[in-house]
Amino acid sequence: MSASPTDNQAQIEFWNGPTARAWVESQQRMDQLLAVLSARALGRAAPRSGEQVLDIGCGCGDTSLAMADLGARVTGVDVSAPMLALARQRGAARDDVIFIEADASSHPFEQVYDLAFSRFGVMFFADPYRAFAHIRSALAPEGRLCFICWQSPRDNPWLSVPSAAAQPFLPEPETAPDPRAPGPFAFADPDYVNDILERAGFSAIEVEPCTAEMALGGSLDEALEFLIRNGPMSRVLADLDEETRARALAAVRSELTPHAGDRGVVLGGACWIIGARRG
């Protein structure tokens, strides 16, 4: 565990680039998409009035503000300056939430937090063992941890269906991707997550499956716009030439069509909600 604070530099640069700006522009749409999953994760975390909460990877501030509404005093931390700018704007009139631009795996937190929480924000550490040991050091003696992360892509049709449609148009990778590399699905294996937390010093680790319907958009056009601008597919689609990209999107549209209905384009999603104690 010899990682240095700069090991997350690639992720820091990524979340301060075009993807971050797209997330800011799509903030309301993204919060709506994740609303059910957010509610379930927050229900498991159970932030209480007066508690000090650390919201890791807080993004545009949705979960930080939700926990403050429950009476907690929240510190939201993220590496993305564009997303934090919107979070601060949303929380400008409040004194129960602050936002700091920092790497949660190395920032010198005080050991005061009753709860460390994250909604899809802890799967991007270059060295998750080191990162979670550091996060544990920010918790008060009776502190607890709760976060939600994605299960495998194959268990998430909202991603696997359009990804399979686009795959024939994408370049072949030079090497097989590492499923545990920093990214949205790095924590798909619950045994891996359990090992990280145990070695970081956490106890009473619980892994709860969570499924939900994911509305990608109110129409096929909205769903395609979401996939182009946000989420894992946006990176690979952006690298295609115009003609190939158009063919890929036509194939994706065709595969999404059977999933379009009165509620929009709806596919299944699957996550893990992880809970633990400082130990």
Image (cartoon, rainbow, N blue to C red):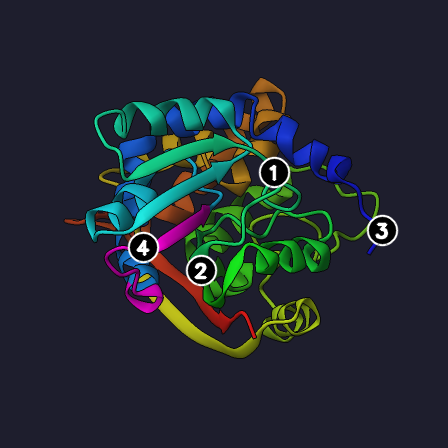
Disc 2 versus disc 1: nearer the observer: 1
In the rendered structure, which amino acid carries the disc numbered 3?
A: Ser
- Residue neighbourhood size for the residue with mark 4, other residues' Cα within 10 Å, grouped as few (<14), some (14–19), many (≥20): many
The image's mark for residue 38 is: 4
**C-alpha gap between disc 1 and disc 3:** 16 Å
Give the extent of the magenta segment. 43-55
Q: Which residue is mark 2?
A: 148
In the rendered structure, which amino acid carries the disc numbered 4?
A: Ser
In the rendered structure, which amino acid carries the disc numbered 2?
A: Ile
Within the image, what quadrant is residue 89 found in? Answer: top left
The C terminus lies in quadrant: bottom right
- The answer to whether residue 265 of the structure is visible from this angle is no
Q: Position of residue 161 (x, y in %)?
A: 47, 53
Left or right, 264 with respect to 250, comes to left
Within the image, what quadrant is residue 199 found in? Answer: bottom right
Q: Are marks 2 and 4 in contact (CB under 8 Å)?
A: yes
The image's mark for residue 94 is: none
